[in-house]
Amino acid sequence: MIVQDNPNKVITLQGKSVHNVKISSDSNECGITAILVLPDKQILVADFKNKRVKLLDQQYQVVSHCSVTGYPWALCDITPSEVAVAVNETAKNIHEVQFITVNNRQLVIGRKLQLQHACVGIAFHQGDMYITAYTALYKYTLNGKLVSKMYEDTSDSNTVINCAVSRTGDKLYISNNTQHKLLTLARDGSVLATFTDHALQAPTGIHVTPAGQVLVSGGGSNTILQVDSEGKRKLATLGTEEDGVVKPWSVCYNRHTASIIVGLEDQSSILVFKVE
């Protein structure tokens, strides 16, 4: 099991299982852009290509689902039963945060925040909501008031894709997809570290475990990496193409089962790796 106080303890993957999350009414193959483990041990996944959020039970079976207005890019938890979904579809001018409540194995659509910019990554920490917009990172209050534009990089497209907050809230991790970087920002938006590695190409998903370990998926390199909590060096390559990690988009640690769940861009299955 993971040592709670050591964010740099290297994770080792053991056995793997594969679980299909496609349902009969899905018109497309799934693309799992986000995964979230709820405190009650249920799991939420964002199915990008079918524009749905799906609720899985502890055996990874779909027990409920709901549709969103555009493509669901990212998920974060707000309370033990409420989550926020980053929904974006530029062609239809849809940029919004959709709140969903998980109630008795059902997904209940709640309020929505309409944004004036793209909404592709989302993270929440102690009242602050962090939203990425392809080339910028914004901070909002929970009721949708813009606090600040924390960081911007317009040198390329997709320089600010996903974001995650360190357990203590003092650092933000950002995936720069086109320039193959993982950035670590301070609370004020200044860059603390820039991480690059040949094993990390086109990074998308970032996840911080309860122990503070940093996981990142390389969509172009077919890898899941563990990076140190400072965001400066690679600790391990956890998963590769040989493990079935093909175009990974999302990664999430499930503390209830000591496993890592990986969502793939072009497949209807999620991968579940036991860890030690």
Image: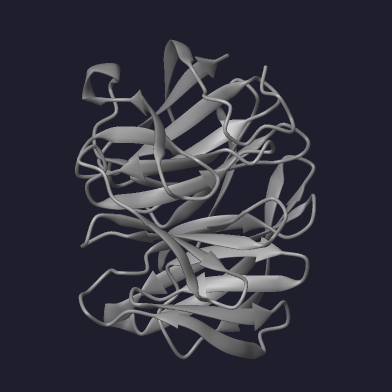
Q: Is residue 56 left or right of residue 226?
A: right
The location of residue 76, given as percent across then percent down, is 61, 56
| Rendered position, 142 above or below 72 | below
161 and 23: which is toward the camera: 161
Q: Pick the quarter of the image with the N terminus.
A: top right
Residue found farthest to the top: 15
- Which scheme is used to colour this image of the protein? one colour
Q: Is residue 46 above or below residue 271?
A: below
User: Above or below — where is 50 with respect to 228?
Assistant: below
Tell me which corner region of the image, top left, top right, bottom left or bottom right, holds residue 171: bottom right
- Give above or below for 122 relative to 102: below
Image x and y of residue 207, in percent? 52, 45
Seen from the viewer's position, the closer of residues 1 and 90 is 1
Indicate the quadrant containing the C terminus: top left, top right, bottom left or bottom right: top right
Q: Is residue 214 visible?
A: yes
96 relative to 80 in the view: left or right: left
Count of numbered badges drawn on the protein: 0
* Residue found at x 40% / y 76%: 133
Q: Residue at x 52, y 24 (%)?
A: 10
Question: Which residue is pictured at 22% across the width and 79% down the height?
Answer: 155
Percent across and percent down for residue 18 are 40, 19
Instruction: Determine the residue positioned at 31% across, 50% down.
Output: 203
Q: Is residue 24 among what the camera can see?
A: no
Q: Where is residue 194 drawn, in percent x and y?
A: 37, 59
In the rendered structure, the answer to whether residue 29 lies left or right of residue 261 reads left
